[in-house]
Image (cartoon, helix red, strand yellow):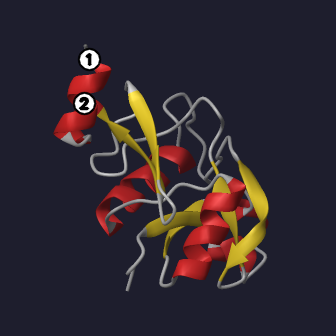
Amino acid sequence: MGKHGWTLVQHSGYGYAHHPGFELGVEERAVDNAKDRRAVESVGGVLFASYNAAAAAAASENYPGDYDGLYPSVRGRFAAKSLDGLAVYVPPEDKHVCAWCNDERGPLIRIQSDERSMWVCLRHMPFRIQSDLTK
């Protein structure tokens, strides 16, 4: 599972069971093929390198630091595109996390190629790119 990474989607408690308490919740979802990866990228969703990074991001998004409610309450939006029938989650424009360590403090850089797009912190950038950016 997760051959092409992991992403966040609308919580299945709402997407499948229609429980209103989970309408603003997210959960991690494997991205198993290139078509799904392109769908996530095309709407501004985030790709994570590991399940653990996606799970940590889901927890952070569901229960932001100043929120103390029982049910999750993300601040991003849900895209029209979906994986397994669950809408892809798009974090707020000002909120991105490193795909490897889930660090949101930054600076974060969006790395994009023909096949992939992700946000990474300077610690996880390839050395050559990192040295060019810090000159």
Distance Cα–Cα, label 1 vs label 2? 6 Å
Task: Tell me if mark 1 has few (under 14), some (14-19) or many (20+) residues whose alpha carbon lies within 10 angstroms of its own.
Answer: few
Q: Return the x and y of residue 23 as percentages of the image width and height.
A: 74, 61
Q: Residue 130 carries which label?
A: 2
Regarding residue 10, the answer to whether it shows in the image is: no
User: Which of the 4 image quadrants contains residue 120?
Assistant: top left
Inspect the image, locate mark 2, and give the three-letter code of the amino acid beneath it.
Gln
Regarding residue 72, the answer to whether it shows in the image is: yes
| SS at circle 1 | loop
The residue pinned by badge 1 equals: 134
User: Which of the 4 image quadrants contains residue 52?
Assistant: bottom left
Residue 48 vertical position relative to residue 13 in the rendered view, above or below: above
Nearer the observer, 109 or 76: 109
Task: Tell me if mark 2 has few (under 14), some (14-19) or many (20+) residues whose alpha carbon lies within 10 angstroms of its own.
Answer: some
Q: Residue at x 73, y 76 (%)?
A: 15
Asked whether, in this view, residue 45 is left or right of residue 129, the answer is right
Q: Do the residues labelled 1 and 2 touch (CB within 8 Å)?
A: yes
Residue 56 vertical position relative to residue 38 in the rendered view, above or below: above
Q: Return the x and y of residue 38 as percentages of the image width and height.
A: 61, 69
User: Which of the 4 image quadrants contains residue 71?
Assistant: bottom right
Asked whether, in this view, residue 88 is left or right of residue 129, the answer is right
| SS at circle 2 | helix
Nearer the observer, 27 or 30: 30
Inspect the image, locate mark 1, and give the three-letter code of the amino acid beneath it.
Thr
Quadrant of the snapshot with the N terminus? bottom left
Q: Which residue is drawn at 41% across and 70% down?
A: 5
